[in-house]
Image (tube, rainbow, N blue to C red):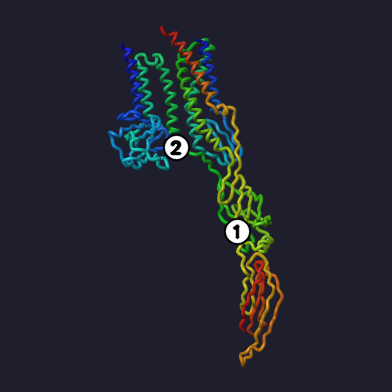
Amino acid sequence: MREKAKGIFQILIVVSMIIFAIGGRFLPTPLGFFTVSGFSMYPTLKPGDLVIGVGTYISPYNEGDVVVYCKNISTCIVHRLMLVNNTYAITKGDYNPSNDPPITVDSIRFKVIGSVPLLIWLQLAVASLIFIFFPINPGKGFKQPFVLETFIFLFFLLVNLAYLTIYVFQTPPALTRIPLPAVSLATLSWEKGFSSIIIGYRLTGLSIREVEECLLIAQSLTTQCSRYSVSGNRLLIHPPAEFYKQLYDSNLSAFLVKLTLSLDQGTLVGSYPFVLEWKKPVLVIVDDKLVLSNPNPVPIEIIGYRIRSYVRNTRTLHVDEVIEYSSSGFTLQPFETREIDLAWILSTSYVEVRYIFMNQTFTWVGRLDK
Amino acid sequence: MLTYQLIAGCSAILYSSIVLLILLTPLYYLEGVVKGFISFSFYQLKMGDTLINLPELERAISLSMPITLNSLFLLLLGLSSVAYWIYRRHSPVLARLMFPTSMATVFSTTFFYMTHTVYILKVVESLAGEYVVTNSAGILILGEVILKSSPLADMMNSPIPLLSLSILNAVLSTMWISRIYTKLSP
């Protein structure tokens, strides 16, 4: 009889535990117990935590409370209430980036009043079950059948669960990220006179070994870089003069430097845009001199120049005579400045210089006052 | 009874040896940009001369502690059982210890498999492949990482081999303990 009562008691314990565990999902129980299964409420609630909820018909809820709503018997969600009115409510997991879809207020079943971490509630539950199902007689100790076995089994089980709780359920899973070496562009510049292009990099965990390929590309023009050198994190490229000449002759000003660099780890392939601003030659008359400067890295052809001197009659102030002098052309080399002496001219004159710039002929006129 | 002791002991040695071998030997080798190896107990990954630390693998190492403990204890019990059998002695205490330990290995094996799938395999899969980064400097092609797995790693691809072994081990130790309790019962 006593054994039968004991058996009924054990069955009742199991049934009540099941009702406590899952009853709240489909019965209007005053209390509901749920276990957290994800990281959506991290760090407020962690996976495995036992959530204790009070029926919403007992304790009303407000915005900001953590509530339990059930979509169906198998799916109940523990999230924070963000917005609520008479018909619908909006919830959100503390760790989630956005709100959940709206839910009806009827689906909110419990207001969460507390939680117990997995490591505590599971141990308490297991220990309770041991004492209910394996009552220990202190006099017999481990000599009783299956008591030693149960303890050893539970010891290993709890070790597993403890590690699982500590290392898996405490922090959300992170993406595996390897600290990769990095490279980024620091500078794109010219050295004075366009003689060299400077490309500077910011390198982390990498260094430039050599230049595998260097091409200068402008529309259909493609030229190999004639000379280049690596200086630490900088690359100095010396474009050939012919390339600039080809650009100039084709009326092009933009080009790309396409590089393939061999690094100590891997390869860097990059295309860097450059724009050359072609400038007309600078012509001025200063101190009886005609000064012609070419600010471009290409030669500019000066077709020729002509000087017209107006000799005036000092008494009548009329122009009596016009003396004209012309000279053949020459080539103004890249960045060259040439001076033409005009000191021999005795009267006011106009200097007319004709030159070709970007395939067009221009005439420049300057006045020389005497 | 001695035969049960021998069979259960040998099964315990076999299972625990395989598990310890999986725990201690490198399961995956990486070649290319990232070089090194990964095992359950330790790993060494290098990019160039820089050692890489991965928190997921550190976790996997920590998570392998319960099964290491379980397997070492089982190995000890298995070796003791066989040693007792050699001297033709039967030990019911060993049976009482081996039964729950073997039962616990079924759970440990499940967690072990989960650790492998969730942490190690995930890391390994994310490490393998092409390393190409695009930024302001252009396209940085760091190269490829080739993954080679050991036969023991292939064994971990499915839970069936290890889980079957642990269940077999649990069944054999259950048979041994049942035999003892049957004999003891009036």
Residue A277 appears anywhere in the view: yes
Instruction: Count residues near mark 1 (Cα–Cα under 10 Å), then give few for <14, some for 14-19, many for 20+.
Output: some
| Disc on res. A172 | 2
Question: Number of numbered discs present?
Answer: 2
Q: Secondary structure at mark 2?
A: loop
**As drawn, which residue projects farthest toward the left?**
A58
* 1 and 2 marks on the same chain: yes
Q: Secondary structure at mark 1?
A: strand
Q: Residue type at mark 1: give it.
A: Phe
Instruction: Count residues near mark 2 (Cα–Cα under 10 Å), then give few for <14, some for 14-19, many for 20+.
Output: some
For the residue pair B42 and A82, the one nearer the viewer reads as A82
Image side of residue B95 versus residue A231, left or right: left
Q: Residue type at mark 2: give it.
A: Pro
| Disc on res. A274 | 1
Quadrant of the rendered image containing residue B34: top right
Image side of residue A69 versus residue A178, left or right: left
Q: Is residue B29 above or below residue A238?
A: above
Separation (CA) of disc 1 from disc 2: 47 Å
| Disc on res. B1 | none
Q: Position of residue B93 (x, y in %)?
A: 45, 14
Residue A94 appears anywhere in the view: no
